[in-house]
Amino acid sequence: MTEILPFLKDLISAPGLSGYEDPAANIIADKWRPLVHEISRGTLGSLQGLRRGTGKEPRPSVMIATHMDAIGLMVTGITDGFLRITRVGGVDVRVLPGTPVNVFATGAGASGTGATGAVTSAGEANVRPPLPGVVAQPSAQLLPDEARDGPVALEHLFIDTGLLPQKVSELVRVGDLVSFAQPPAELSGETLTGHSLDNRASVAALTVCLEELQTRPHVWDVWAVATSQEEVGAIGAAGSAYKLRPTIAIVVDVTFAKGPGASDWSTSPLGKGPTIVIGPNIHPALHKSMKELADKLEIPYTLEYTPSHSGTDGWATQVAAEGIPTLVIGLPLRYMHTAVELVALKDIQRTGRLLAEFIARLGPDYMDKIVWDK
Amino acid sequence: MPTIGNAQLKLLEKLCNACAVSGDEGEVRSIVMEEIKGHTDEVRVDAVGNVLVTKKGNGKSPSTSLRTSQPHLRVMLTAHMDEVGFMLVADDGEGLFRFETVGGMDVRQLPGKAVVVGREHLPGVIGARPIHLTTAEERKQKISLDALRIDIGPGTTKVKPGDWATFATRFQRSGPSVLAKALDDRLGVATLIELIKHAPPEIDLLAAFTVQEEIGLRGSRVAAYTFNPDIGIVLDSTPANDLPDWEGEENIAYNTKLGLGPAIYVADGSTISDPRLVRWLAETGTASKIPYQFRQPGGGGTDAGAIHKTRSGIPSISVSVPHRYTHSAISIARIDDWKNTLALLQAALANLTPDLLASERA
């Protein structure tokens, strides 16, 4: 049940903000290399693994897309050694004060030495240890009236690295990335908390799927894609869908788990399996066959209703090129876009297994079933 | 002369990573007892949980305690063991608990933080509603405490209402600074441990590691009654609000600044420091070339607020290592400020005689 845990903990300990996914992509590529036949990077940074099927060429293909980019912050300025910041992706400013962060400093003084002044070895010439820091909320008298008791706007928050102002000016430059630094922790009931579980938890589910496929013959080609820049508009997925031109696409992304502050119709229970999404973003035939399969295999799931935008890579994938039949699978997650997101490991395993079972059942004639208004 | 080296930083790390919310100081108390073993003449845990340590002077000094006619000046030094935190107050099921804050906390510092709960330090989180489900109007309001829960994950019976919780922050070094929770007042606790290990020979050192400072200076009050000292010196950690002002104006209400050395209290919200003690510490700092600063007079308070009113009154003062981001998940302090705080106290205690209390007040 928890074999995927060490990989996922490594993966969420890496940065990989939108547009700068390499640290995550490298970890995923190492994990996927033995599981796929080919691996490549898309033009905009998506990681694309191809696992060839056993069918006659030209074979149909299914793309499983899970975004690997993470939300975070970016340096916009330095005042007296304190870093001013903006957001990368959707961040509620109210969860920031007191949050541990890593600053990936690239200023002139940053090369060769890291946060603690340690000299990096030649082999790690390009790997500079990040500067630890914290999102600082100035005390009330330093803030405008409305921020003395209410939320403090991003423009008034800083990052404090504990370093002296001169050192900060040498190390950090405008545009440097800042990731959350909350270490992963296993909670009760086989749940995991940490930052960037949106959507690395789905990357882990796709990895479980690829592992299952090692012993399950499949006719179709499988494109396992860890997409870039989802959090800023499904940019990487759109490019990969266009380039790879899969016959069908399944997008796996996290969805709102029921929990404190999240209880309405759009939420799904944690630990009770993935969601199978219904809505305009979903090809109804794909939805139907996935649902029937889950019923048959007695894999628990919840139906998720998305009346319009699914808020996932599926939105762009569906309208790539001449259009791609698309299905979205949701992985319930609490506290989305905070440094303490929370998932159930069981849900990751079940999602991975369901994907593998679906792929293994894709026959040469599957597309004949993809008909409208039957 | 002892100073702050790796061993002292290791001790501070251990103290900061320990969990000791007001009323539940056991973990820090155990570390203190272990550290001072073999360095005391007398040690006991009193009725409220304070650790009371006596280290007698060596008898070479002709000085006599003014209050008790004992042969040595009796100087009480205190540092509080407790930290702000949380108590679980209701079980909502599925691993979710309502909680209350213990000690003064800004609720805006709580959403999105990792915590540890109970004696076993079970990890948990304080989450927040996903931004996707909030409205623009809602985001203009702070998230209130009653909307927050501590989530430890489902299916365990190891946690129950009544358990305490604190931030899960682990101690970290960064250049000249340390980043940790509970620097207020583990810096004081670590300093006091060092002073016991290297006690000044001329005075009776009465060390009190106090409880419940954060909820009303309660431990120090009984410790001061018990010890009945000639002088009370409180070792605490005070906020440095030395960040830029939002309009670019000069920050004139910084309280203290990091890097300027120990903060000597002249007056805070609950105590007018004894002017003779202010003079003594400042003159010692100047003479010994140890940097120091005066904490800006104003609100706030330390255990001195209880100590100086004990019995017929006790001349008292506080000295703090400054830290930024008080009572939050991560505070930041400068190692040099701590080093200079220890140096100032050692130099001052070494030159302390009853003459000081016989001198003019001001």
Image (cartoon, coloured by chain):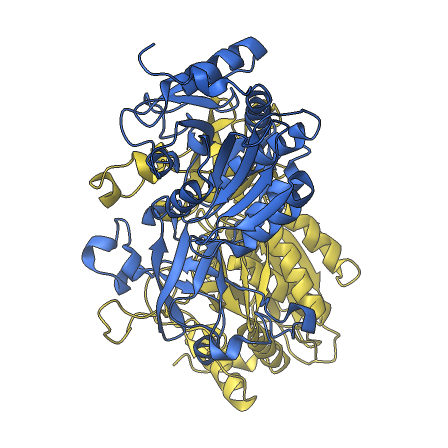
Q: Is residue A305 visible?
A: yes
For the N terminus of chain A, the image quarter is: top right
Q: Is residue A135 above or below residue A355?
A: below
Is residue A144 found left or right of B8 in the rendered image? left
Residue A350 percent location from the top left of the image: 57, 23
Q: Nearer the viewer, residue A211 or B147?
A: A211
Residue at 74%, 75% in the rendered image: B59
Number of dots carrying numbers: 0
Q: Nearer the viewer, residue B167 or B104?
A: B167
| A343 versus A32 height, above or below | above
Looking at the picture, how far across and down is residue A305, in whole percent? 34, 21
In terms of image quadrants, where is residue B5? bottom right
**Residue at horizontal 54%, vertical 30%?**
A59
| Chain blue in the figure, letter | A
| Location of residue B231 in the rendering, given as x and y in whole percent from the top left corner | 54, 68
Identify which residue, B291 or A124, lies in the foreground: A124
> Which quadrant would residue B26 be assigned to in this image?
top right
* Colour chosen for chain B: yellow
On the image, the x and y values in percent for residue B353 come to: 59, 80
